[in-house]
Amino acid sequence: MNWKDPYTELTRQVEQTAPNLVVLLAARLLMGVSLGGFWAVAIAMSARLVPSDYLGRAVTVINAGVSVATIAAVPLGTWLGSLWGWRGVFLLAAGAALVALLVQAVTLPRFVPDTAGSLRVLVVTLRSRSVRFGLGAILVVVAGHFTGFTYIRPAAESVSGIDVAGLAVLLFAYGIANVAGTAVSGVLADRVLRGAALLFPAMISLGMVAMVVTGSTRVGLFVAAVLWGFGFGGVPTTAQTWAARTDPQHLEQLGGVTVTVFQIAIALAAVGGGLLVDHIGVTAPLVVGGIAAIVGGLLLASALRPAAR
């Protein structure tokens, strides 16, 4: 079976269409700025739209929408691409983004930031020891997850011998569990933020290690993927709720820094996971990543007082 990952294939087509490397990098840069800006503003907007007791649930609504859209977009985009070509799909996505922008402009209230945005304000925000400690903990959790997830395909194939069709089902199960974790994370973050900060990284760790230990059986492999997906589904909401409650006077600044930490963690995880695969084996990123996830969860939980609200 000549199977090609649809996202990779679509990316290859776009790269071949770009007239030169500069244009390609500029397009990717604009996309990265847009995504980073969306997440940074989403945290501040969520905190201003609802009472503080419902902050986690508000963040969950945003994250759940992104999770569902991510799961639905790949098969839908692949199907539409086969009918219209990738240019048609891109034009459709641009139109959808424009509609979303107009709806937000009409429905969202006007908010004025509590503090003027500047580099000085950002430096002041980062002077807080609790902020730096929490950001470091989030870095460790996210890096642990992506250390393993970047190499989940070769690891799953190594421990179980799963074929491409089975891997697609496995990742689908992971995605559904991820949405479920996102759905419950808001309520937990609102009621027991400290417990959520430990629970979700612990489930990531359990799932990653279980995939190595029990992944030789099909049931063990899928149970591990579900635990892992559920655990990471709750991490973004927990991290964003922590950020909004740790320093509510600097929501925009701390939201941007939190997103930056996520991106740095992903980059470090890809490099670190690759080194582990090269020098130890394809399952090493899962073990190391699982250890990092639980350590980061313990650090983040310890940074929160029981009355963190």
Image (tube, rainbow, N blue to C red):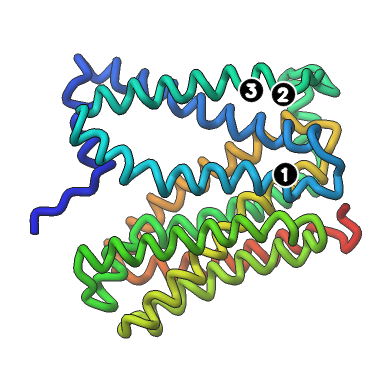
- Please say whether residue 11 is visible from this viewpoint: no
Q: What is the secondary structure assignment of the residue under circle 3? A: helix
The amino acid type, in three-letter code, at marker 1 is: Ala
Residue sitting nearer the eye, 295 or 153:
153
Q: What is the secondary structure assignment of the residue under circle 2? A: loop
Position of residue 245 in the picture relative to residue 229 (left or right): right
Residue sitting nearer the eye, 169 or 287:
169
Crowding near pointer 1: few (<14 within 10 Å), some, many (20+)?
many
Residue at horizontal 60%, vertical 55%? Answer: 182
Residue at horizontal 43%, vertical 70%? Answer: 225
Counting from the top left corner in percent of width and height, residue 133 is at 73, 51
The amino acid type, in three-letter code, at marker 3 is: Gln
Counting from the top left corner in percent of width and height, residue 39 is at 60, 35
Residue at horizontal 49%, vertical 73%? Answer: 207
**Circle 3 residue:** 104
Counting from the top left corner in percent of width and height, residue 149 is at 41, 59
**Circle 1 residue:** 58
The amino acid type, in three-letter code, at marker 2 is: Leu
- Marks 3 and 2: in contact by CB < 8 Å? yes
| Residue 192 falls in image quadrant | bottom right
Q: Which mark is residue 108?
A: 2
Crowding near pointer 3: few (<14 within 10 Å), some, many (20+)?
few
Residue sitting nearer the eye, 198 or 237:
237
